[in-house]
Image (tube, rainbow, N blue to C red):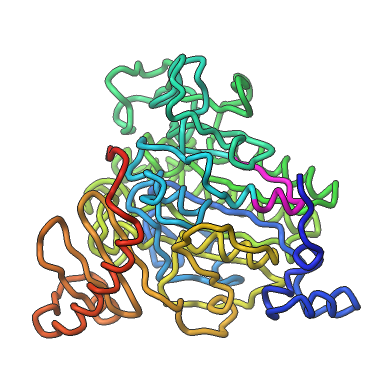
Amino acid sequence: MTSAPSCALLSAASLWLGSCAATAAATAGSTDAPPTPNVILLMTDDQGWGDLGLRGHPRLETPHLDEMARAGVRLDRFYSASPVCSPTRASVLTGRHPERMGIRGANSGHLPPEEHTLAEALRAAGYTTGHFGKWHLGTLTTEVKDSNRGRPGATEHYSPPWEHGFDRCFSTEAKVPTFDPMITPPREHGGVARSLVPGGPYGTAYWTGPGERVTEGLEGDDSTLIMDRALQFMDGAAAEGRPFLAVVWFHAPHLPVVADAERARRFADLPLQERHFLGCLEAVDHNVGRLRQRLRELGIADDTLVWFTSDNGPEGKPDSGLGSTGPFRGRKRSLREGGVRVPGIVEWPAGLAPAVIDVPSGTVDTLPTVLAAAGLPLPDAALDGVDLGPLLRGESADRGEGMGFRHKGAEAWTRGRWKIHRKGKEPFTLHDLEADPGEAHDLAAVNPELVAELKRELAAWSSTLGAPSGPESR
């Protein structure tokens, strides 16, 4: 393990004030500059933009996330890098569009060893690092059958979190039921393959390291099991006085959705999948509350940056009850707003004042923003993300550049209030997202100059990605 430059470790003031002179001032006794933060990255799976109490959801109650949004920075135009999960997860850890590393869909490709991850950068700077929950960036074993792609002798996509900078792991390759995660639920809960027998093993294990499969203590709410291990990790880091990175990627509310009986009873008047979907989201919110309370008890809440989001929009048809996109068109697997606009909340009491920001930002921005907050240099790689620090602090009203999206032949580009979109060889449509958040009105015919300008920006960005490579799944 290498030591980071003293300028990076002494204080995050080098980010927020722009120079190492600020660090020197902090060490000389200034109390205005925030210290280097602990970092917690929370992500749900298939939670829609509208699946929060603060969005006016008619049934869902999320008091802890709502309070986090009021206390922190609420990013109302926050985007996942992809409308499916594996690519988005890759973008969080690398700051790069997933096509740059051949991750084009769920269960396709893997995180290559040459990628520079956030965990590796922070660990080299003295952080202890942990991953808890869904990985979905490669297989976790080559010894036994596990999850979607783990097989004896199958090494092609073996790419576990402990080979990408994580010291502590409690990780699955892919999805599991959101209650009693090792047991296959009845088929009506969704996400149960025909090869699985309800009541039998689900077939996706939790792993803590090479050959270290967890076999005990896996009963009950899956989000709670994940948070239990994450809190133990944070307790240990706090006791040692070490900064930490905790990546906590919940499986909820991905199918199969199963909530504990008490939470499901709150929604007994709804169809089965919908009641369990809402119940397991309320369990996520409960565990966010546990996390925020533990940080206060440990005395580190002010100095911890907590970032909450979802990996893509909700599954299913709009009338399925499985997730709300608010006013937006499209859902998971679509580059329309409902497929990629997701919840975004950043809380760092010592470094950020409460704010609501309606400017494009996204999961690709996570790595550069966190590294800047830690006073660390960016990796020597082509990044698609930017440091959101000026935006989060209210020093800038713009991300500074547009954002591009590609998925399964569709492409989109958004800058400011404008967005162009097309599928395949269709003509581009143009939408004013401030006046028309539902993308109902195509303005391309009345504003061809703007379409041409945005197309040039998209083409320039796409040219840096190269031709799509790697297999696509779903």
Residue at 25% across, 46% down: 316
Residue 123 sits inside the magenta stretch:
yes
**Side (left or right) of 209 relative to 243:** left
Residue at 47% across, 64% down: 385
Query: Can you say whether 244 is above or below 360 in the image?
Result: above
Quadrant housing the N terminus? top right
Quadrant housing the C terminus? top left
Residue at 72% across, 78% down: 19
Query: Can you say whether 201 is above or below 167 in the image?
Result: above
Residue 441 sits inside the magenta stretch:
no
**Side (left or right) of 70 relative to 442:** right
Q: Which residues are magenta?
A: 121-131
- Pick out the residue farthest to the right: 28
- State the image quarter where residue 71 is shown: bottom right
Along the line of sight, the residue nearer the viewer: 49 or 114: 114
Query: Can you say whether 190 is above or below 34 in the image?
Result: above
Image position, residue 378 (x, y; %): 60, 62
Query: Can you say whether 204 is above or below 11 in the image?
Result: above
Image position, residue 129 (x, y; %): 68, 45
Image position, residue 165 (x, y; %): 63, 42
